[in-house]
Structures are given as C-alpha cells and as structure tokens.
Amino acid sequence: MKNTRHVFHLVVAIAVIGIATPVPGSGQTSDRDVLRDRIDMLLSTQEATIEGAPIGATALIDELFAWRNYEPAWSDPGMVKQLFDQVLRSVEHGLNPDDFHARLLGKRLNPGAMVDDPIFRADTEILCTDAVARLAITLQFGKLDPTYLDPAWNFSRKIERQDPLTYFNQVLDTETVALTLATLGPQNHHYRWFQEGLREYRSIKAGGGWQNVSAGPLLEVGSGGPRVAELRQRLRISGDLEGPAPANPQEFDSGLEAAVKTFQIRHGIDPDGKVGPRSIEELNVPVETRINQLRASLERMRWVFRDLPNKFLIVDIAGFHAYLINDGKQIWETRVQVGKPYHATPIFKDTMRYIDFNPTWTIPPGILRKETLPAIRKDPSYLSRNSMSVVTTSGKIVDPSTIDWPATTKGFPYMIRQEPGDHCALGRVKFMFPNKYMVYLHDTPSKGLFARTERAFSHGCIRTQNPFDLAEILLADQGWDRAKIDQVVASKKTTRVNLDNPITVMLLYWTAEVGDDGTVHFRKDVYNRDAPIIKGLDEPFRVSLPEGAREAIGYR
C-alpha cells in the first residue's frame, strides 16, 4: 500500500494490534454496554475527560469500537504494559510522558487497580486508545504546529485518509503495540544521534551537572589558580577533557589547552585555546539549557524529516553550514554566511530549478531604500565604483546623471542593478529556488568572513563558501564538468542553466547538532527561536493536528 506510515493508519492499527477480530455474541455484554455508554458520553460533551484527563480522539474511538462491536481491546494487562512502557520512553524523544496519560496508564497496572469495575475497564479502553493517538501524531508530526511559531513555515503537514481496516488487516498478525510505536518518529540516523546526545546530557544532569567557571582575566597556557581548577572540572564533566588528573590541577597546561579548543569547536567559538568572555559565556550555560536545545532539535526533526526525496540540500542556519544529501549520505558540505539577526534568514522549503553563472544583482527594495539610495545621494560616484546600473522595469539602462535622486523609494520608477563580476554581491554563481523572500544560495566576494565561526553577516541570502563544487555536482548528469563551468564563468556573460533534475532545498535551524561519532555541537541561538519551542514542549498537551487529521481521527 502506498505511504502506509500515515498517522491515521498508525493510530487505528496500533490500537487494535495483537487482538483477534471480534466475534459478535462472544460475551462481555455488560462491558460492551458500559463502553458504548462511556463513548456516547464523550461524544455528547465539549470537554471530554476521563478522570480529569482530556480525551481528543473521540471520533476514532467511536469508529474503532463500533467496528469491534464494543469488544474491549485492552483487557490484556500485557498490552497495557507495552503501551505504558512506550509512553515512558517518550522522554527519549524529548517529550513528556504525562502528555500521553502516563499517570493514568500506570494506575491501571497497579496491583490494586479496580479491574472489577466495568466503568474503570471502559475508561481504560478509552485512555489507551487516546494515548496511542497522541503518540502517533506527536512522533510523526511533532507536538507543536510550526506554522504558529514561524509565518514563513511551508513544510507540508498533510496526511491522506485511506481505509484504516485495509491497513489493519495487513499489520494485524505481524506487529505488536511496542514494535509499532517504536517505529514511529523519523527513521534516520540523524534522529538517533540526537537521541543519543539527549541521553548523554541527561546523564550529566543526573550526575549533578556542572558548576560555573568564575569570571576573571583571560585564562591561557601558563595561567594558574582556582579558576583553572574550575575550568578543568567543567571540561572533564562534559567530556572535553580526558586522561588522568595532573599533579597540579590549578595549572593551565597544554592538555587543558587542547580540551579548551575541543570545547570551543563544539560550541562555535574560534578555537584559540584561550578562555575569555565568549568561552566563559558558553561554559556557564546550564546543562538544562543544553538538554532543551537537543529537545528543540528533535522536535524540529519531527516537523521536517518525513517523506523526503532521495536527494536534497539542507542549509543549517544556526550552524552556518550547508549539506547535500543523496540516498541518506552526505556527499557535499560547506560553510555559509546567513542573515544578520535583523535580516534573519527565513526557514522554509522550496525547489532549486536553475543556476545562474555571472549573475547580476537587482537591489531588493528594502536594501535600496535603507542603504543604496542614501549612499548614492551622499556620493554620486557610488554607482560606478560598485559597477551598478540604473535600469527601467523593461531593462533599459538610464544615465544616472539625469536623475534627481529621491530620499525614498516611493514613486521611484527605476531599479538598481549590479553588473556581473568579482565585485558583484552575488559573486560568480547563484542557485535559484524562486521564493517570495528573494532568498537563495550564491557566491560572494566577502570570502574572508568564512574564517569566522559565527557567520551571520548577510541580508538574508546564503553566501556559500564552495559554490562551484556544488554546481559541478548538480550539473554532472547534464554533461558539465569543472572545466566547462570555468569556461562559462570566464566568458563574463550571464548564463542560466536549468536543472534537469530540480532539487529540494530546506532552510532549517539547528542550535544543537550531533555527528556520527556522537560528538554533540551547540550553536548560539542567533535568532532566539528556541524559546517558543521549549515553552510549547513543556506546556500541557494540546493537539496541533496536521492537515487532514481532524477528519481522519476526530481530534477536537
């Protein structure tokens, strides 16, 4: 069946996995009547609750148990235990088990549970089914709806409704509740690496976390005193410093310098091995904050890593890197420069359709108004010095000396275009995925800025360190090699090359990153985008349904 991982399939399948098809007249008439009454009660109220817990999947529960002739699905304590264990394991995804009725499910496994009470048993059926629905949606699509957090968000959250009984028949005899729930969430190694990173930092927290390193003068090789001992202990706890303790822990030696460099690399700081204010700032970030960065990253992955093509390009805005993935493997990566905080690069998904060599740059309206026009009014030679032309909307070049330059763009009938060349703000190549933000990847003459570890310098576009390597990879199946690219660039003529195989581009934002060797990296939250996610993850569960889910499973 096509795309059988849709949430509706999973919700229904999980709720009934491992249970024989109901046989009318097989007994438990009283339990059936009570369960039907309890479900009718839920459907008749605007605030459906069981023992104070909100129940959302009312239509699913009604449809499922009507099909089952109200035969109980969760009468086996072993099935409830499987579900309860998976609910507890939601912490591995950075989630809160209480969002999935953990307390009430655990109550049903207590030796003194009121199993002789038919209402208690009926409520168990409802709670278990609702818990599965919550898990299925959350692990597949995330707890939060990113469109509420970022107006630029355009990733699909759509599910397609198909006959749940067809899917149920396919999985009934082959899967269990535990196995099915364990396969939810992004099924890729990146997600698993993040989960391992989360376990590592939660282990550090369980061990007491770390103490702050006291403020003071620069620490470097040759420094000494109690602050060096604090630094040494801090780096040992986070795993940056290994090996036996030295005879004098208050001495800053070469081994400690190497550990400092490791820490700096992991936290996006220039690795000079010296501990100044920037390093102290990162050293003193609480372990709880690091845990939350990993939780936020896991939530973002649930938003994104679903139904991906074989080949796609990721720009990690907070990490200042771009990656090209093919068949699950990274085949290219480079440093990038992204937007300044007040020119924040948006998060969105689009399709790269063509490449321009020797591009021109038409100054965007905002930059034209705030920067270019004031510069021209101040210095008439600004245009010639920057190889800029004044053009009409039809592309006709206008003599700038004939223009009475205004102080505002209101009513300004011209465009300012920077001509091709090494001086052009776009460099010698740009990669176009047309979008309303006028954001794309491009070369840049500001190559020295790539040496910085924090690279938020642009007006929103993505300046790319090794753009011609990317062009060569993307055009290889069209008969292009580096020699042909160099020849076109040397011609100085603007040349557009359409991609025979357009590629998905995702502009994302990760303040935590975990490599395949398990090394956890953290980045400064340059756009302050983590806080709303953490707040939402910590709040009581609210249903943020993907498109189509309300009709499919009846959440309200």
Image: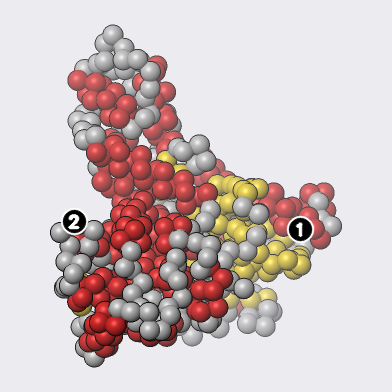
Where residue 361 appears, as percent x and y from the top left, is: 61, 66
Label 2, label 1: how many angstroms apart (C-alpha)? Answer: 66 Å
Neighbours of disc 1 within 10 Å: few (<14), some (14-19), many (20+): many
For the point 40% across and 34% down, which residue is it?
A: 264
Instruction: State which mark lies toward you, 2 or 1.
Output: 2
Colour scheme of the picture: secondary structure
- Residue closest to the far top: 247
Return the residue at label 2. Answer: 111
Q: Amino acid at mark 1?
A: Leu
User: Can you see residue 551?
Assistant: yes
Where residue 152 appears, as percent x and y from the top left, is: 44, 72
Up-down relation of residue 316 to residue 47 (above or below): above
Q: Is residue 371 left or right of residue 86?
A: right
Neighbours of disc 2 within 10 Å: few (<14), some (14-19), many (20+): few
Where residue 4 appears, as percent x and y from the top left, is: 56, 71
Q: Is residue 289 left or right of residue 142?
A: left
Using the image as rendered, state which of residue 536 and residue 112 is in the foreground. Answer: 112
- Numbered disc 1: secondary structure: helix
Q: Amino acid at mark 2?
A: Pro
User: Can you see residue 400?
Assistant: no
- Numbered disc 2: secondary structure: loop
For the point 24% across and 16% down, which residue is it?
A: 250
Q: Is residue 179 left or right of residue 357?
A: left
Q: Are marks 2 and 1 in contact (CB under 8 Å)?
A: no
For the point 38% across and 29% down, which residue is it?
A: 240
**Which quadrant: the C terminus?**
bottom left
Where residue 222 appears, as percent x and y from the top left, is: 32, 15
Return the residue at label 1. Answer: 475
